[in-house]
Image: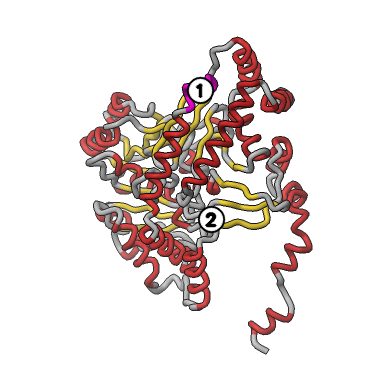
Amino acid sequence: MTTAESSQTGGFDLGALLAERGAERYELHTRYLNHQLPRMLHTIGFDKVYERAEGAHFWDADGNDHLDMLAGFGVMGLGRHHPVVRKALHDVLDASLADLTRFDCQPLPGLLAEKLLGHSPHLDRVFFGNSGTEAVETALKFARYATGRPRVLYCEHAFHGLTTGSLSVNGETGFRDGFAPLLPDTAVPLGDLDALERELREGDVAALIVEPIQGKGVHEIPPGYLRAAQELLHRHRALLIADEVQTGLGRTGDFYAYQHEAGVEPDLVCVAKALSGGYVPVGATIGKDWIFKKVYSSMDRVLVHSASFGANAQAMAAGLAVLSVMEDERIVANVRSTGELLRTRLAALTDKYELLADVRGRGLMIGIEFGRPRSLKLRSRWTMLQAARKGLFAQMVVVPLLQRHHILTQVSGDHLEVIKLIPPLIIDERDVHRFVDAFTAVMDDAHDGGLVWEFGRTLVKQAVANR
């Protein structure tokens, strides 16, 4: 009997295991993983059981169709289970490649690097890791080694990952607290060229790492900042690192978000998330030839930076399939048109709802910010929420969007009154209208003093209890 035949007659059966134990999902997570996650999901009514997914939609155990406006924090750029990516993964598994021998050169990594560099004409080489935070870690190491300097600058409120190096350039104290000592890096205000130049004059700065649009709060860098920062950095022999982990691969209406500003050519670019096709973790650090040649300066240093699962065949096949789909299905063009429709329809509501302060962003990365209302009745309720915990009103909007309208969204960050929309890049006009209609209904309820505020009282009690 062959191994394949043996596996069919006995041994591990994934379908049977899920059928037998799948109902225990929340109990298992509480017992063995992060016990606070199920607690949080139960509290806000997000403890759903989702059974299948396709494209920008997934279905719960009751058969309800949910619209995904979160895309797995941006991982599901092509939606769930795109047939081209699925086929590529089936094909690479069926090929039984001699993968990860460590002492040969397989074709798939070179082919994926070639495709990525085709979208990055001023860059020359690629390092493949396993995630966005690993792509950032690579960029930090390469920048320090290439310049011979220890310090990296980052922008206030930035998010670049949660491993120790990337945490050192994370601008949120909530993530950093309790994990010191970190690397000797320094925050500068977003868009402040004077602050950047003051730090550069110290002579010890290796690089500035920056998100062209910050994920936390969806704050876009001021026009002209990236190019001016690049000129300052190069004048002081420091590097520009663009963190495109969330904004890259079409999210903002160009392949990279930095491409919205003419003349910007980062020395290192970090990508991940959507490159995976939603299946196999992958990250890439793309950089200039001289940087890579300095890091890998001799045969003795050939493995000075590597990743055990980096450039594995499944990840490379998924990445190649993703880039092929982006070209064949004109994904970036769809992002521009649907993003403009979504942002325009939402922006038109700012005059209608006094609780709606701003709509901003690019492409299909949009922030909806709420603010203090003018009318006395709404203002008193707003003040009550703010006194308990900033960010509760945004959560009050997110919850009914899911519970009543079956649309999944997220609050953009802790203590922020901002909802971030990062849907799959394949959404269409019907999805846009569905979201805006649902959002309008929730805002109508909030301004009429309806069920939204009853849930708000529950959140206030929870926030006070957690102090």
Of residues 56 and 383, the one nearer the viewer is: 56
> In percent of the image, x 54 and y 44: which residue is there?
70
Q: Position of residue 358 (x, y in %)?
A: 46, 26
Q: Position of residue 43 (x, y in %)?
A: 73, 35
Label located before the other in sequence (2 or 1): 2
Q: Position of residue 462 (x, y in %)?
A: 72, 27
Q: Count all numbered tags in the image, as a single digit.
A: 2
> In percent of the image, x 57 and y 27: which residue is there?
415
The answer to whether residue 249 is above or below residue 464 is: below
Residue 162 counted in the magenta span: no
In which quarter of the view is residue 1 placed? bottom right
Q: Secondary structure at mark 1?
A: loop
Inter-mark Cα distance, 2 to 1: 32 Å
Residue corresponding to mark 1 = 352
Q: Quadrant of the C terminus?
A: top right
Give the side of residue 74 with respect to residue 32, left or right: left
User: Which is more foreground, mark 2 or mark 1?
Assistant: 1
Q: Secondary structure at mark 2?
A: loop
Give the side of residue 243 with respect to residue 88, left or right: left
* Residue 123 appears in view: yes
- Which residue extends farthest bottom? 1
> In percent of the image, x 43 and y 51: which residue is there?
135
Of residues 441 and 95, the one nearer the viewer is: 441
Residue corresponding to mark 2 = 55
> In percent of the image, x 74 and y 58: which residue is there?
22
Q: What segment carries the magenta color? A: 349-356
